[in-house]
Image: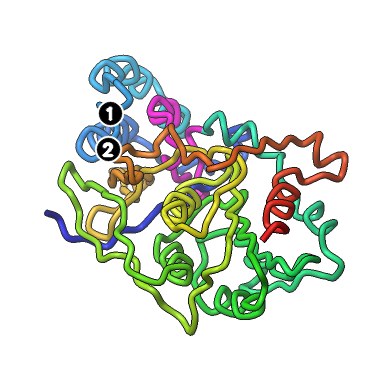
Amino acid sequence: MVKTKLLLILSTVILLTGCEDIIVKPENSNLNVEDFNATWARVNAIYPYLELKKINWDSLYIVYKPKAEQAKGDEIYPVLIDLLGELKDMHIEVGTEGGRLVETYQGPRWLKDKYSFNPIIVRNYFDRELKITGEGNIEYEIIPGNIGYIYVGSFNVDNLKNPFYQALNYIKNTKALILDIRHNNGGSSDHVETIVNRFITSTLEKPESYLLGELTQSPPFTPQGPFPYIKPVVVLINGVCASAGEYLPEVMKQISTVTVVGDTTAGASAGATLDVPAKYNLPSGKKVYIGTLDLRRYDGLPWEWIGVAPDIRIEQTKEDLANGKDKQLEFAINMLKAF
């Protein structure tokens, strides 16, 4: 077994349109073919889902190599973006000379749900202002009917433990809780562990993961904190939840007090480790980011492309929001009122 510390990659949300505006032309770029070859070889060596996705990577080398040979200067960027876009992986990005990252793919569920959540509409369901902590990443309050509400916007933060503990302590006497992670694009799995450990009373095994084809080894989730929250919990998810934003609901579904509500997540499961990181430097100094770790659901399948389905599916559209309605939140509130 490979013993490693699991990290999830943040799925950076940058639209592909207008890429030319964020690419800074290098003064001297004569390593385009070398950069192409290095990118192709990196994917061939470490990318975990070529077989799963039935991608003939050798044939794509033949297609894109002439384009790399013909590329002058920063014309290599579209070649690399298009090549890596063939993997249809939301974790794969190309670093520009300006330091920005360009996504090579956006999944269909991400595109469907990107306008289906609005924190301003969420506020319609409270009779007081939400409290905000964690540099704006966490919002919390109590909904009428003594239902706690905590929103966690991202796992790509330095410190989630202290602000999350603060929010959970505030709502500890509620009869139920809504944990809202809609539009959470992911980040570090350490923050997922911080949250899960507050809702369990005994150890919980983690789902499997594989690095370069070998099973990794990680300690189980373990109860932490001054108290476990063991009352009913609804976790709200949607198609913009990606990476660690999918790992959390997959784990929370294993807890008997938890019901996951909303819509199926994006389907972006490739992670990385400290030993085999996603970031890879090309010969010219350009960078590509390619997942190296094959993360699985508890049923043994990667959530790549598949996503994590809710226990109860409630679709929501931008038209619902335009009418001042958050159907997913409303369902969760009405469900928990019965407890």
At numbered mark 2, what does the secondary structure look like: helix, strand or loop? loop
Label 1 crowd (10 A; few <14 / some 14-19 / many >=20): some
In this figure, which colouring scheme has been used for the structure?
rainbow
Q: Residue 3 appears in which quarter of the rendering?
A: bottom left
336 relative to 148, above or below:
above
Task: Answer whether residue 302 is visible to the viewer in this image.
Answer: yes
**Which residue is located at x 32 percent, y 41 percent?**
299
Task: Answer whether residue 288 is visible to the viewer in this image.
Answer: no
Q: Quadrant of the C terminus?
A: bottom right
Q: Position of residue 219 (x, y in %)?
A: 25, 66
Q: Which residues are magenta?
A: 81-105
Q: Quadrant of the N terminus?
A: bottom left
In this rendering, would 335 be left or right of 197? right
On the image, numbered disc 2 is attached to which residue?
Answer: 47
**Which residue is located at x 66 percent, y 69 percent?**
175
**Which residue is located at x 26 percent, y 49 percent?**
208
Amino acid marked by disc 2: Tyr
Q: Position of residue 287 (x, y in %)?
A: 38, 46
In this rendering, would 217 be left or right of 110? left
Q: Residue 82 appears in which quarter of the rendering?
A: top left
Q: Is residue 94 magenta?
A: yes
Q: Nearer the viewer, residue 297 or 153?
A: 297
Q: Are marks 1 and 2 in contact (CB under 8 Å)?
A: yes
**Which residue is located at x 34 percent, y 35 percent?**
30
On the image, numbered disc 1 is attached to which residue?
Answer: 50
Q: Position of residue 270 (x, y in %)?
A: 36, 43
Q: Position of residue 321 (x, y in %)?
A: 81, 42
Amino acid marked by disc 1: Leu
Q: Is residue 88 magenta?
A: yes
Number of numbered callouts drawn:
2
